[in-house]
Image (cartoon, rainbow, N blue to C red):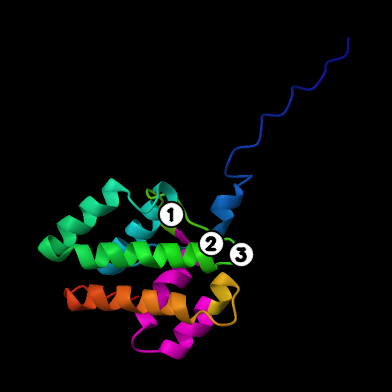
Amino acid sequence: MTTTPAPSPAPSPAQHPSALAASLQGPLPADANARLALFAFRRMGAHGLNDAATSTMLMQAFGGSFRRPLVLMRAMMADLAHAAQCPITIAPCCCARMTGSETTVLTILARAETAPDSARILLGDLIGVRRPDGVLASMTLLAQSFADAGRPISL
């Protein structure tokens, strides 16, 4: 009598990570303001510019002066979507890690006022455009709106 070996169990998800898991390069930022910007970026990227959860979160964070950061976040997202020549990877809102694209966006927002040349180069690489000045302007205005409200974005 011959016995056949038992079939091997299916590989676990940890043995075959998804493409999204492989793209999650870094942890969430320690800065609460950067996490707020990341949340708004993710929500608007996934659910559109008029996402109610984003509006509510910014209203809670900024109080009565929430309109400026909200409108500028919408403008930045529209500019990024219009100008980008390559995909920008966005993780789900509940994800505890960031994609390389998200890290770059937050780095640009953190450097927009203090190191604009560095921010310009990073943005050009992110969206695949040689002259990203229009998008950089909207990102700089967004960073300024956070800073003016006492919530500067830093990494």
Tags 1 and 3 in contact by the CB under 8 Å rule?
no
Compared to residue 144, the image places residue 59 above or below, namely above
- Picture quarter with the N terminus: top right
Q: State the separation of the CA atoms marked 3 and 2.
A: 7 Å
Element under disc 3: loop
Element under disc 1: helix
**Residue 65, image x and y in percent?**
14, 66
Q: The disc labelled 1 sits on which kind of residue?
A: Gly
Residue annotated with mark 2: 88
Compared to residue 107, the image places residue 12 above or below, namely above
Q: Residues within 10 Å of mark 1 (few under 14, many from 20)?
A: many
**Residue 42, image x and y in percent?**
40, 55
Q: Which mark is residue 9?
A: none
**Residue 90, image x and y in percent?**
48, 56
Tags 3 and 2 in contact by the CB under 8 Å rule?
yes
Q: Per the image, is 112 magenta?
A: yes
- What's drawn in magenta, residue-wise? 98-123
Q: Quadrant of residue 5?
A: top right
Tags 1 and 2 in contact by the CB under 8 Å rule?
yes
Does residue 60 show up? yes
Residue annotated with mark 3: 86
Residue annotated with mark 1: 45
Q: Residue at x 45, y 75 (%)?
A: 135
Q: Residues within 10 Å of mark 2 (few under 14, many from 20)?
A: some
